[in-house]
Amino acid sequence: MAAAKKIVIVEDDLFVRDLYERQFKQEGFEVSVAVDGEEGVNKISKEVPDLILLDLMLPKMNGLDVLKTIKEKPETKNIPVVVLTNLGQDEAIKQCFELGANGYLVKSAYTPTQVVSEVKTYIK
């Protein structure tokens, strides 16, 4: 059997974070979580996951800054990033894709199961 795909979830909301962590683990993923942008960048650099699930509204360092930082580093720039947020504004979406995000999901529009399905399409 192939090794479990590793995902880092950067999300400050405890309920949301636990929900997705459980959902991805049930699907056989190895999951690591970060509660703010700074911790997210550190974990991503250290663990180099197969995919990053990133919220935009984060303490210490917002999601756009996290995205910019990881896309500037050679060791993390090719990791797919799926933004999972409640911000549905066109400007935020456009900025995310300009910075290198692979996908953009609005939390309220997807169930956790749908999010897992979407994320799987970004993992090789």
Image: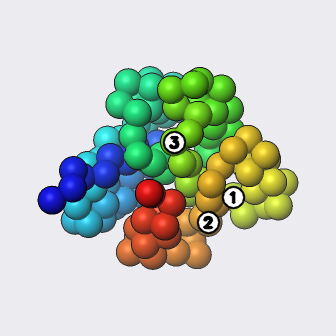
* Circles 1 and 2 in contact, beta carbons < 8 Å: yes
* Residue 86 occupies quadrant: bottom right
Q: Residue furthest right?
A: 91
Residue 61 appears in the figure: no
The residue located at (45%, 25%) in the rendering is: 45
Residue type, mark 1 in image: Leu
Does label 1 or label 3 sit earlier along the sequence? 3
Residue behind mark 2:
106
The residue located at (58%, 34%) in the rendering is: 77
**How far is the residue under mark 1 from the one under mark 2?**
7 Å
Q: Which quadrant of the rendered structure holds the C terminus? A: bottom left
Which label is found at residue 79? 3
The correct choice, above or below, for 5 with respect to 77 in the image is below
The correct choice, above or below, for 78 with respect to 13 in the image is above
The correct choice, above or below, for 113 with respect to 88 in the image is below
> Label 2 crowding class (10 Å Cα cut-off): few <14, some 14-19, many 20+?
some
